[in-house]
Image (cartoon, rainbow, N blue to C red):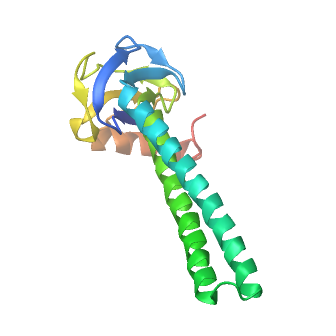
Amino acid sequence: ATDKVDLRARVEGFLEKVLFREGQDVKTGDLLYQIEKAQFEAAVEQAKGNLAIAQAELVNAQLRYDRAVDLAKRQFSPQSQADQDKAAVDTAKGKIMQLKAALKQAELNLDYTDIRAPIDGRIGRTAFTIGNLVNPASGILATIVSQDPIYVLFPVSVRDLETIREARRKEGGGLIK
């Protein structure tokens, strides 16, 4: 086969579904395995909640900063209070960036619970069945090999190779088509 892919789990969890027959032809994008999703869905929801809290904190910090700037302009409040509130706004913005990254990672991990065929080909024997705990260290779940094109190697002895070369020299040395 020209292409060969070893399927591996990218997250840890129990195998919930094996959606193919061993030896079956598969297409790119076909769903092959499903790892239980509940813990990863919960992580996504938690990350969304944390992000919503941080966004509310940013709104509050921005309001406090705007008030402090207004009061400092009229000399009803020290400039240091406005500076502290500005730092709180910047901190809230940084926290939002961190939590967006955490949400993206949680969504990726949820997506990794679906193991799909990366290439067209024939899938081999599954190393794990439903109910088994799999993780990145589990090793190969199954292997897909492409079916079209396929390379074929023909062993040729040195004596036969010389006979073939001699015959080609006599025929003009071109490639056989």
Which residue is more in the foreground, 162 or 116? 116
Q: Is residue 126 left or right of residue 171?
A: left
Q: Position of residue 5 (x, y in %)?
A: 40, 35
Q: Image point 60% across, 53% down: which residue?
A: 56
Quarter occupied by the N terminus: top left
Residue located farthest toward the top when viewing the structure as drawn: 21
The residue at the point 53 percent across, 22 percent down is 27
- Where is residue 154? Give x, y as percent: 36, 33
Q: Residue at x 71, y 72 (%)?
A: 66
- Quadrant of res 87: bottom right
Q: Is residue 167 left or right of residue 156?
A: right
Front residue of 73/175: it is 73
Q: Quadrant of residue 67?
A: bottom right
User: Where's residue 29, x and y in %?
Assistant: 54, 27
**Quadrant into which the C terminus falls:** top right
Whether residue 1 is visible: no
Residue 40 visible here = yes
96 versus 14 height, above or below:
below
- On the rendered structure, is 130 left or right of 110? left
Q: Residue furthest front?
A: 76
Count of labels shown? 0
Q: Position of residue 84 (x, y in %)?
A: 56, 80
Residue at image location 39% in from the left, 22% down from the top? 33
- Identify which residue, 79 or 156, lies in the foreground: 79
Q: Is residue 105 above or below residue 123?
A: below
